[in-house]
Image (cartoon, rainbow, N blue to C red):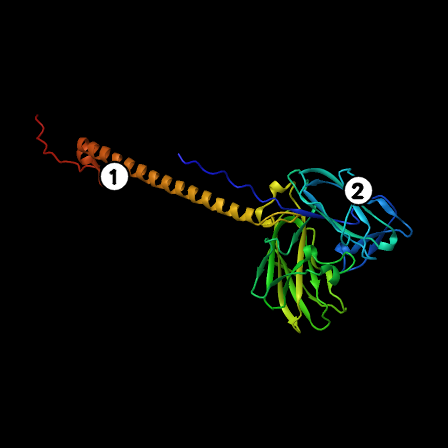
């Protein structure tokens, strides 16, 4: 009897994104919604009203999951005034440009509250993300997948993955690429594909500060051509959060998005930043592995865990394959022995029946009729 190792648990690093103007965000002091195309997620951001001080709390959000990250920005002097409270604790002063990351939390309900100072800091809130857990209700959520998560497949040798270290300088005021990374390309024939379980999908990019040139991309859903569109930037600064493509109204099920670059003018580059899709699964345990991140999509994590799981899967596969081979061999031996016994019984029966049975052909043989001379009838 073989003692099989336990099957590895599926990866669970799934992140969903919440826009600043989502109804689940609760604002605690006067707030002014803003619209600015092609710079912020969903083209919106929020700030506080004039002469408003939100030191006791600007907004809060309640969620079930394993972590939260707030994408917000502040301008002004070197000293930024903002603080964050988690699960009702006292507000904790923060340092930086306005963002907040909780780190790993217990998989349960949490409430995060963000507070900031006067309007002179021009606070900017764009979106927050939640690292989902087993208790997180996922259906209808907008799942976000980073360009480096490993489940977006890139085809071609021209792709270059780049981390934008000076993201705050290049994209001030709370803007910038998701997780400060993009996949750049400027080669005709390069493509990417992404498989997901959902009812809508969108592809976002970063456009470089390059006035000359442009790029044309074809888009397919499930191998069906949808549209082709040209992209260029006429400004002097790079453009983050640029929505290249969106398809909604898809049937609930598994789909594949593919983007194929068909033309490039003046060596124009484009940076693929992230994909979002509306989930059609209730929780992460129902999510297919093709749509899961191969690395942490949240605050913490290590790629070594996935590497070890792959080794365990290979061991389990080898053991199961060996058991299947042994089973086939034993079945073949059983069939051969059964056939041999049947032939022996057939030969024994043929000895009794004589000409009426041919054990080699395994068919019945009809004996020839024999003729007998008849005597004349006696009168």
**Residue 31 horizontal side relative to residue 208, left or right:** right
> Is residue 342 or residue 256 the one in the foreground?
256
Residue found farthest to the front? 79
Circle 1/circle 2 CB separation < 8 Å: no
- Is 268 drawn above or below residue 62 in the view shown? below
Q: Residue at x 23, y 32 (%)?
A: 345
Is residue 227 visible in the rendered image? The answer is: no
Distance from Cα at disc 1 to Cα at disc 2: 91 Å
For the image shown, how many numbered marks are present on the structure?
A: 2
Q: Quadrant of residue 238?
A: bottom right
In what quadrant of the picture does the N terminus appear?
Answer: top left
Q: Determine crowd level at label 2: few under 14, some 14-19, many 20+ residues with C-alpha closer than 10 A.
A: some
Instruction: Work out whether mark 1 precedes mark 2 in sequence or the reverse, and give the earlier one.
Output: 2
Is residue 130 visible in the rendered image? The answer is: yes
> Is residue 108 or residue 91 the one in the foreground?
91
Q: Secondary structure at mark 1?
A: loop
* Residue 192 x %, y %: 60, 59
**Residue 319 horizontal side relative to residue 113, left or right:** left
Find disc 2 in the rendering and name its residue.
91
Residue found farthest to the right? 51
Q: Secondary structure at mark 2?
A: loop
Q: Quadrant of residue 42?
A: bottom right
Residue found farthest to the top? 379
Q: Residue at x 17, y 36 (%)?
A: 369
> Is residue 169 or residue 129 the one in the foreground?
169
In what quadrant of the picture does the C terminus appear?
Answer: top left
* Residue 222 x %, y %: 60, 55
Q: Disc 1 or disc 2, which is closer to the eye?
A: 2
Find disc 1 in the rendering and name its residue.
362
The numbered dot on residue 328 is none
* Residue 283 x %, y %: 64, 41
- Is 14 drawn above or below residue 170 in the view shown? above
């Amino acid at each position: 009897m073989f003692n099989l190792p336990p099957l590895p648990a599926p990866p669970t690093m799934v992140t969903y994104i919440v826009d600043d103007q989502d109804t689940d965000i609760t604002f605690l002091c006067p707030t002014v919604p803003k619209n600015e195309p092609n710079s912020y997620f969903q083209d919106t951001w929020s700030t506080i009203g004039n002469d408003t001080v939100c030191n006791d709390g600007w907004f809060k959000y309640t969620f079930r999951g394993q972590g939260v990250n707030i994408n917000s920005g502040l301008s002004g002097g070197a000293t930024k005034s903002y603080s964050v409270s988690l699960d009702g604790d006292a507000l904790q002063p923060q340092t930086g440009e306005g963002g907040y990351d909780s780190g790993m939390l217990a998989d349960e309900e949490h409430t995060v509250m963000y507070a900031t100072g006067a309007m002179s800091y021009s606070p900017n809130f764009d979106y927050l993300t939640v690292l989902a857990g087993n208790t997180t209700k996922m259906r209808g959520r907008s799942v976000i997948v980073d360009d480096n998560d490993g489940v977006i497949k890139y085809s071609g040798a021209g792709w270059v993955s780049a981390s934008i270290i000076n993201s705050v300088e290049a994209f001030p005021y709370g803007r910038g690429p998701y997780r400060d990374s993009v996949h750049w390309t400027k080669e005709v024939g390069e493509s990417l594909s992404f498989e997901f379980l959902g009812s809508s999908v969108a592809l976002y990019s970063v456009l470089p500060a390059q006035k000359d040139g442009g790029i044309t991309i074809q888009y397919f859903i499930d191998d069906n051509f949808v549209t082709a569109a040209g992209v260029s930037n006429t400004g002097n600064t790079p453009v983050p959060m640029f929505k290249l493509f969106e398809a909604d109204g898809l049937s609930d099920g598994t789909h594949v998005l593919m983007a194929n670059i068909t033309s490039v003018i003046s060596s124009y580059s484009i940076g693929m930043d992230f994909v979002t899709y509306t989930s059609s699964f209730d929780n992460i345990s129902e999510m297919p592995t093709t749509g899961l991140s191969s690395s942490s999509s949240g605050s913490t994590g290590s790629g070594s865990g996935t590497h070890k799981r792959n080794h365990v899967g290979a061991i389990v596969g080898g053991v199961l394959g060996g058991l299947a081979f042994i089973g086939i061999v034993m079945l073949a031996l059983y069939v051969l022995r059964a056939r041999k016994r049947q032939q022996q019984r057939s030969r024994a029966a043929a000895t009794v029946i004589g000409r009426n049975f041919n054990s080699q052909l395994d068919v019945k043989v009809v004996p020839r009729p024999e003729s007998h001379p008849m005597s004349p009838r006696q009168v």
